[in-house]
């Protein structure tokens, strides 16, 4: 199932989207969907990183410890 939405984007982005759509022979909707999927994945990864950063029970490993462990 899919849902139609409406957005406004700057002319410059619309022109770039037109070019990419023509070059790839894919619809603008396809590229917008892929861009949103990538953004949401990156946002989820950022949230995991922030959660780990603020988790006081998660051990911190120093660069020196990592070098010793991997013999670098």
Image (cartoon, helix red, strand yellow):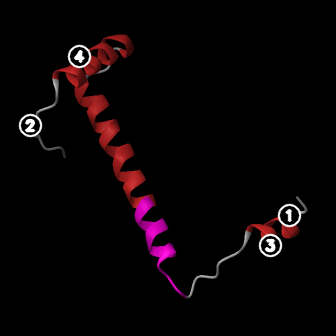
- Report which quarter residue 9 is drawn in: top left
Q: Secondary structure at mark 1?
A: helix
Q: Nearer the viewer, residue 5 or 61?
A: 61
- Cα separation, mark 3 vs mark 1, equals 9 Å
Q: Is residue 44 above or below residue 26?
A: below
Is residue 42 placed above or below 26 in the rendered structure? below
Q: Is residue 23 left or right of residue 14?
A: right
Q: Which residue is mark 3?
A: 65
**In the image, which is nearer the foreground, mark 2 or mark 4?**
4
Q: How far apart are the alpha carbons under marks 4 and 1?
A: 48 Å
Between discs 4 and 1, the one toward the N terminus: 4
* Above/below status of 18 relative to 31: above
**Circle nearer the N terminus (3, 1):** 3
Task: Tell me residue 72's x, y (percent).
Answer: 88, 58
The spot of residue 38 in percent (x, y) is 39, 44
Of the two numbered discs 1 and 2 in the rendering, the one whose residue sits closer to the viewer: 1
On the image, the x and y values in percent for residue 20 come to 34, 18
Q: Mark 4, residues whose alpha carbon is within 10 Å: few (<14), some, or many (≥20)? A: few
User: Which residue corresponds to mark 2?
Assistant: 6
Please report whichever mark, 2 or 4, sits nearer to the chain's N-terminal start. 2
Examine the structure image and report whether residue 48 is included in the region drawn in magenta.
yes
Work out how far the residue at label 2 is from the one at label 4, CA to CA, in angstroms.
17 Å
Q: Secondary structure at mark 4?
A: helix
**What numbered label is drawn on residue 70?**
1
Mark closer to the chain start, 1 or 2: 2
Neighbor class of circle 2 (other Cα within 10 Å; few <14, some 14-19, many 20+) is few
Which residue is located at x 18 percent, y 44 percent? 2
Q: What's the magenta region?
A: 46-56
Please report the residue visible at 45 percent of the width from the left and 59 percent of the height from the top.
45
Residue 50 at x, y percent in the picture: 44, 69
């Amino acid at each position: 199932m899919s849902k139609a939405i409406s957005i406004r984007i700057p002319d410059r982005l619309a022109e770039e989207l037109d070019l990419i759509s023509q070059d790839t022979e894919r619809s603008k909707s396809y590229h917008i969907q892929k861009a949103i999927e990538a953004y949401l994945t990156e946002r989820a990864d950022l949230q995991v990183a922030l959660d780990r950063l603020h988790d006081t029970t998660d051990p911190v490993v120093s660069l020196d410890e990592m070098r010793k462990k991997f013999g670098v």
